[in-house]
């Protein structure tokens, strides 16, 4: 598999992604899947300023990602796939065969959200994680590569 990281992080491209994860996993491309961002060239240019030289970035809608990710998964190019929310990632795991693990990196505060200092889940989030787990996708919380992954979902809750 050429995709070296499927990550949910509401901040998308930021220090932990480009310094922590990119240094460790050395992607050639970062693919951000976000319908609004796929249409906003100005915001894309802002995100691109934080990407190290030698790493390309694509900004795809969910529809584009569903269509293009099967080929990406079969290619030899090292790729990160980022979404800002669990719903988008859950949709990708439903529509795109071959996604084996999802890293939940950062979801912040909101009413009824809890789990870890950097991951706050509500009941809807937990349902999405359980759906992904039921499809055989391992879902873990892990902010940086040096931290141990924390299994999420019904299996982790026992």
Image (tube, rainbow, N blue to C red):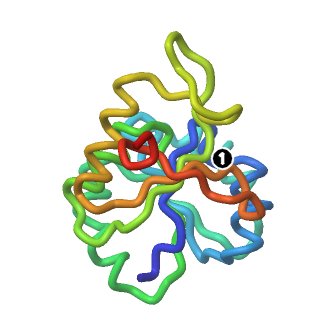
Residue at the (62%, 57%) spot, across then down: 149
The quarter of the picture where the C terminus appears is top left
Query: In the depicted view, which residue is nearer to us: 128 or 85?
Result: 128
The quarter of the picture where the N terminus appears is bottom left
Q: Is residue 92 above or below residue 108?
A: below
Query: In the depicted view, which residue is nearer to us: 56 or 100?
Result: 100
Q: Is residue 45 above or below residue 18?
A: above
Q: Is residue 37 above or below residue 113?
A: below
**In the rendering, at what x and y percent does residue 57 appear?**
56, 62
* Residue at far top of view: 111
Report the side of 14 relative to 4 (left or right).
right
Give the quadrant of residue 102. Answer: bottom left
Packing grade of label 1 (10 A; few <14, some 14-19, many >=20) is some
Report the side of 70 relative to 35 (left or right).
left
Report the side of 8 relative to 74 (left or right).
right
Residue at the (57%, 45%) spot, across then down: 44
Does dot 1 land on a helix, a strand or a loop? helix
* Residue at far front of view: 158
Residue at the (69%, 56%) spot, across then down: 17
Residue at the (48%, 60%) spot, across then down: 6
Q: Which residue is mark 1?
A: 47
**In the rendering, at what x and y percent does residue 4 appear?**
53, 73
* Residue at far bottom of view: 76
Report the side of 81 relative to 72 (left or right).
right
**In the rendering, at what x and y percent does residue 121 appear?**
49, 28
**In the rendering, at what x and y percent does residue 48 appear?**
66, 53
């Amino acid at each position: 598999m050429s995709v070296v990281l499927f990550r949910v992080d509401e901040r998308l491209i930021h220090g932990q992604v480009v310094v922590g994860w990119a240094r460790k996993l050395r992607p050639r491309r970062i693919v951000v899947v976000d319908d609004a961002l796929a249409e906003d060239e100005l915001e894309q240019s802002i995100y691109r300023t934080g990407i190290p030289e030698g790493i390309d970035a694509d900004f795809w809608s969910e529809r584009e990602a569903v269509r293009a990710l099967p080929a990406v998964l079969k290619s030899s190019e090292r790729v990160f796939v980022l979404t800002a929310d669990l719903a988008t990632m859950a949709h990708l795991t439903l529509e795109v065969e071959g996604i084996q693990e999802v890293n939940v990196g950062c979801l912040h505060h909101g009413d009824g959200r809890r789990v870890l200092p950097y991951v706050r889940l509500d009941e809807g989030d937990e349902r999405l994680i359980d759906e992904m787990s039921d499809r055989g996708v391992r879902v873990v919380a892990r902010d940086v590569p040096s931290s141990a992954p924390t299994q999420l979902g019904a299996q982790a809750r026992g």
